[in-house]
Amino acid sequence: MPHTSSVQIARALLADASRILVLTGAGISAESGVPTFRGPGGLWKSHRPETLATPEAFGRDPRLVWEWYAWRRALVSRCRPNAAHHALAALAHARDGVRIVTQNVDGLHGEAARERAVRDGTASVEPIELHGSLFRVRCTQCAHEYAHRAPVDASSPECLPTCARCGALLRPAVVWFGEALDPTLLDAAWRHARASAVCLVVGTSGVVQPAASLAEVTRAAGGAVIEINPDETPLTPIATVSLRGTAVELVPAVCPGG
Ligand code: NAD
Ligand code: ZN
């Protein structure tokens, strides 16, 4: 656990900020049981994620890529939002000007937001999911995109899920390595980063662009950066406050009202 004074400084920065951008990565969901790509359990059948989460891998062997996504979807379906997701959902519901931008595709911020909205009797404040969702699919032909939570059978190419509209092969609606992010989402995140007094970065290795640049955008515009991560990252040098520890230990501790 970091020194209490750094926790207090982070908490005071967040309490005073009229606008906050929260940028999260795989580390925030690690304590919910979702493996990170770069930590233990990140490999699947000895494949590296960088070789599976690409359009080329899907073009070569859609069955293999779907088998990996079927495994990830089944794993994530058993996971629940943790205290860090809940503390951030509470902050975003309590205060205007707080935006959660996530690189995660596990849907856990959205679940925490909907639980909070039910508890408060308000509308849900949804996160910006920059890299899409494991539980959405997109048609490889007509580009129709929709929610899809049913288990996927990837035992043979003939079993793979097909489009409800045109019958062509579906793919996960996630942004793969080498693909562009949705420009509307990216623009919204960028504008919020520029206008924020604080960027709170939780559980991201800071190596996947352009998401990692959001913290730099806030810093360059004169805002503060608070980093929560058990390890140093490439974002550590620009952090105003770096807190070494886990998301569940530290996020509720720095969230005003938490
Ligand atoms: P990453 O796997 O590269 O890095 C995870 C980071 O989390 C590391 O810096 C690690 O030190 C930190 N971390 C580990 N345990 C933590 C904890 N308990 N609390 C706080 N931090 C902890 O993840 P990334 O930076 O998000 O980039 C990887 C890419 O992979 C992203 O594009 C993301 O979409 C995808 N991904 C998503 C999920 C998910 O949806 N949960 C899981 C794995 C990968
Ligand atoms: Zn279609």
Image: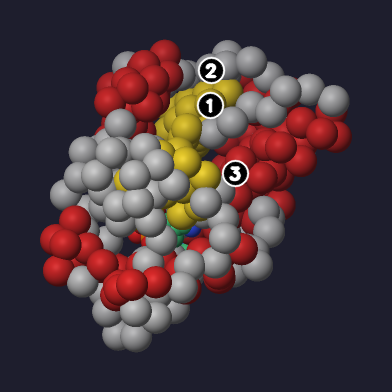
Report, in whole angstroms, how far the alpha carbon at label 2 lies from the one at label 3: 19 Å
Residue located at (36% from left, 16% from top):
191
Instruction: Give x and y (percent) for residue 80.
Output: 68, 59
Q: Does residue 110 lie above or below 199 as drawn?
A: below
Q: Which residue is mark 1?
A: 99
**Quadrant (top left/top right/bottom left/bottom right) for the C terminus:** top right
Q: Earlier in the sequence, mark 2 or mark 1?
A: 2
At a point 28% along the width and 26% down the height, the residue shown is 183
Circle nearer the viewer, 3 or 1: 3
**From the viewer's perspective, is 9 left or right of 68?**
right
Contact, CB < 8 Å: mark 2 with mark 1? yes
Q: Amino acid at mark 1?
A: Arg
Q: CA distance from mark 3 to mark 1?
A: 11 Å
Dot 1 crowding, Cα within 10 Å, few <14, some 14–19, many 20+: many
Q: Is residue 174 left or right of residue 22?
A: left
Q: Type of residue at label 2? A: Arg
Q: Which residue is mark 2?
A: 19
Q: Name the foreground residue: 199 vs 48.
A: 48
